[in-house]
Amino acid sequence: MNSHEHYLKRSIEVSKSSRANGNTPFGAILVGPDGEILLEQENVEITEHRCTGHAETALMERASQRFEHDYLWNCTLYTTFEPCAMCSGAIYWGNVGRVVYAATEEALLKLTGSHEQNPTFNLPCRDIFAKGQKPIEVIGPFPELEAEAAAVHDNYWT
């Protein structure tokens, strides 16, 4: 297993915790340049009644308070599903230089359908970052992990 898969599997574990805690099943982690996991974040939009409570956005809010802007550029955000437009914006403004995700937003749409709790965009994070002024690296999807990431959503959106 390569290091990306290791950290993605950890983000999947965080998504399981998110669901167990009454939130939507998404998880994200922030990894420093030395490979240390700096932060883990579940979704909090339900339990904290925050429309911006997606795991990646909440993680970036915490990260921007704890770490220097320049340091974050050398960090990697790992997440279960491709960041949405809001989360991509938070990553961009938070200055994280690399994003790695297990499954695409398109794969998520297949799980959520038209569920009002998650009106999924069809807007890849690569497209959002490409419109910005900094070269955020995007790695993903990892087809070998898609089923594992999706399994946490079993019977959630029905």
Image (spheres, helix red, strand yellow):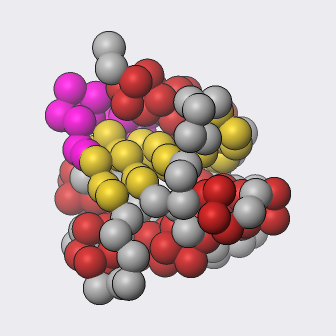
| Near-viewer residue (127 or 13) | 127
State the residue in front, 137 or 117: 137
Q: Is residue 85 left or right of residue 35?
A: left
- Give the image quarter of residue 28: top right
x, y percentage for residue 62?
76, 59
Q: Is residue 14 visible?
A: no
In this orientation, which residue lies closer to the viewer: 17 or 131? 131
Q: Is residue 15 above or below residue 75?
A: above
How far from the left and from the top, in percent, is residue 109?
26, 59
Q: Position of residue 85 (x, y in %)?
A: 40, 76
Instruction: Look at the magenta stretch and give its main secondary structure.
Output: helix
Q: Is residue 104 above or below residue 124?
A: above
User: Magenta region: which residues?
Assistant: 140-153
Q: Is residue 105 visible?
A: yes
Q: Nearer the viewer, residue 95 or 79?
A: 95
Write the residue at 35% across / 46% down: 101
How many circles with numbers are drawn on the protein? Answer: 0
Left-right relation of 17 to 11: right
Whether residue 69 sits left or right of residue 16 in the image: it is right
Q: In this image, 139 relative to 157: left or right?
A: left
Q: x%, y% of residue 143?
A: 18, 34
| Residue sticking out furthest to the top | 1
Identify the residue shown where x is 60% and y is 70%.
Answer: 94
Residue displayed at 32% across by 14% down: 1
- Residue 103 shown in magenta: no
Instruction: Examine the structure image and report whether residue 145 is included in the region drawn in magenta.
Output: yes
Q: Residue at x 32, y 40 (%)?
A: 102
